Image: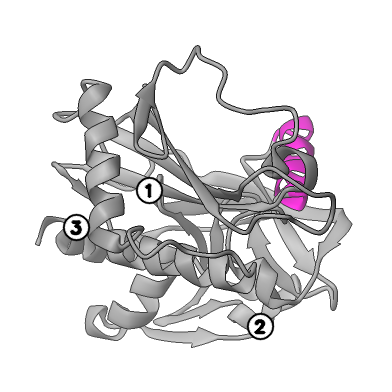
Amino acid sequence: MINKNGTLVSNEEPIFNAGNRGFLYADRIFETIRYQNGRLLFWEDHYFRMMGGACILRMDIPIHLNMDFMEEEILKTIDACNLKSSCARIRLSLYREDGGFYLPTDNTLTYLIEVNEIEQLSTSLNDVGLSIDVFHDHLKPKQALSSFKGGNSIISVLSSIFANENGLDEAIILNSESHMCETSASNLFVVKDKTLLTPPLASGCVDGIYRKQLIEYGESWGFDVQEKDMKTFELITADEVFLTNSIKGVQWVKSYKNKTYGNSRVKEIHRGFTKLLTA
């Protein structure tokens, strides 16, 4: 089942008109949220990131689309999909109503909730480390629009295709100054002893939810978390490398080109998140 503006419909039913602005102009924003153990993980952070992006896109946010209302709508959709006792991936999308060309004739929002069943987030780190390399074909701009998920996703799409064609798990995206920004679907962290380095938001990276938790809780887990502009050379001198996103959590990277990494520090980070999620 899919939830469109509070109405539950079959995912086999047509839900868009030909003039849909999300399709025509990528005039949209979305969040990907994990549902586990009967709750939406880091829901407050997801909600405020989305609404901040909607404000940047100058969308009119109806007063009833508050955090409690949207949570209820998501949970209603999960229940309708018979996934209340399972784990699920939720995609919550906001897009402007149909009408106009580049200039919209209506700033009113439509919301769409899609739910898919996924596996339980593991209490242990991924057994097989990831393999990554750099995607050079296109650079991500350094701008406020880059910090949330929406119409700027084409570079993530192209870098994912590049990774797949080259037998990689993910590809590193560079920004307009050739600094590392993020990977195809994750935030990037470089480990040097007990210091965690990650690109700053000004680099153009997505304002990741797990990234935010690490910056907030990293010190209490014994790490010094620093936001730093980094060239790819930092990967050669790194002790360890790992990625984070809301669906897969923490994943350690085993190789970058001919460089290989261990995962002892990443295991500590993973344990910190496991405790945080079960608190």
Q: Which mark is residue 33?
A: 1
Q: CA distance from mark 3 to mark 1?
A: 14 Å
Q: Earlier in the sequence, mark 3 or mark 1?
A: 1
Q: Earlier in the sequence, mark 3 or mark 2?
A: 2
1 and 2 marks in contact (CB < 8 Å): no
Point out the residue furthest to the left here: 279
Query: Which residue is depicted at the point 56% across and 67% down?
Result: 53
> Quick check: can you spot residue 123?
no
Q: Which mark is residue 277?
A: 3
Quadrant holding the C terminus: bottom left
The type of colouring in the image is: one colour
Task: Tell me the residue that label 2 is attached to.
Answer: 202
Q: Which mark is residue 136?
A: none
The amino acid type, in three-letter code, at marker 3 is Leu
> How many C-alpha atoms fall within 10 Å of the one at disc 2: few (<14), some, or many (≥20)?
some
Q: Position of residue 156 (x, y in %)?
A: 70, 49
Give the number of marks.
3
3 and 2 marks in contact (CB < 8 Å): no
The residues colored magenta run: 154-167
Query: Which residue is depicted at the point 73% across and 77% down?
Result: 143
Residue 143 relative to residue 249: left or right:
right
The amino acid type, in three-letter code, at marker 2 is Ala
Q: Position of residue 187 (x, y in %)?
A: 54, 62
Q: Is residue 218 magenta?
A: no
Point out the residue furthest to the top here: 12
Query: Which residue is depicted at the point 67% across and 28% down?
Result: 17
> How many C-alpha atoms fall within 10 Å of the one at disc 1: few (<14), some, or many (≥20)?
many
